[in-house]
Image (spheres, coloured by chain):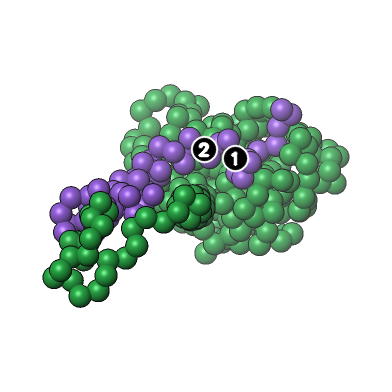
Chain colours: A green, B purple
Amino acid sequence: MAATADETEETTDASEPEPAPRRRPGRIALAVSVFGELLITAGVLLGLFVVYSLWWTNVIADRKADRQADKVREHWAEPQESGPGALDTKDGIGFLHVPAMHNGEVLVEKGTGTDVLNDGVAGYYTDPVKATLPTTGKAGNFALAAHRDGHGAKFHNIDKLRKGDPIVFETRDDWYVYKVYSILPETSKYNVKALSAVPKESGRKKPGHYITLTTCTPVYTSRYRYVVWGELVRVEKVDSERTPPKELR
Amino acid sequence: MYGWIWRHLPGNAWVKALISLVLVLAVVYILFQYVFPWAEPLLPFNDVTVDNQ
């Protein structure tokens, strides 16, 4: 068929028994076919974008998160040479374990910018409200955000959380065991009050040790925010084998 | 459009098919590596935080 591909050839080749297909469609037919090809291209592009956002970003993010998590674990395994209270927040401050979400451990890092969250981690808020880290021991709200879809999708199953489910935060020295006590399945993205030290919407009025998970909802969109509040139940010291608390066993 | 590209690729049908495949892979690579990461923050699909902006 390669011999007939030359479009300037008007005469039929003698060696070919069939006449060559018509090579000169009208202008309109040409325009329609180019338009059709553009539409197909647009469709394929959109399809690829979906593949990118829902699959490829997860691959990339999980890879990065694993690397960073390994670094944190290695760092923890080293003997503590720096003075007490020296908290290295660059690689991550700890791991979040939410058994109801069935996604293993989620590294927690500082900040909720896309540059942080796109690495497949959960970030604690520094803006507009500064989260209170549980390691400080002070009363306050440990407010976190992570992606619902793509980029690791670490909070994808946030809707599987029910009241009473445990949320465990692991640091170098302690397990912080929280219990979910309130869920807000849909709120405005401007609702920064959800992050306040005493989140009144959750029904609590007194200062305490709270944890807040935020992500977007409904899935695949960012129209609203999904908020889950938990309360500190107890703190367990990490033993030499890093035996997880009974909620994770 | 695609017919035009096909006709202007050198070689026989197999070579053309191979070159086409390479071209498609190159385009997908450019899209995944540069175009989509650039376009994504401009699209309202994955903002997860609450803020006052």
User: Which quarter of the figure has residue A22?
Assistant: bottom left
Which kind of residue does numbered mark 2 sit on? Ala
Q: Residue B22: where, in percent of width, then height? A: 25, 51
Seen in the picture, residue A142 relative to A220 is either above or below; the reply is above
User: Which quarter of the figure has residue A78?
Assistant: top left
Q: Residue A115: where, in percent of width, then height? A: 50, 33
What residue do we see at 61% from left, 58% from top? Answer: A157
What is the crowding at mark 2: few (fewer than 14 residues within 10 Å), some, or many (at least 20)?
A: few
Dot label at residue B39: 2
* Residue closest to the far front: A11
Q: Secondary structure at mark 2?
A: helix
Q: Residue A123: where, in percent of width, then height? A: 56, 38
* Residue closest to the far bottom: A17
- Residue identified by numbered label 1: B43
Q: Nearer the viewer, residue A157 or A220?
A: A220
Left or right: where A193 falls relative to A105 = right
Parent chain of label 2: B
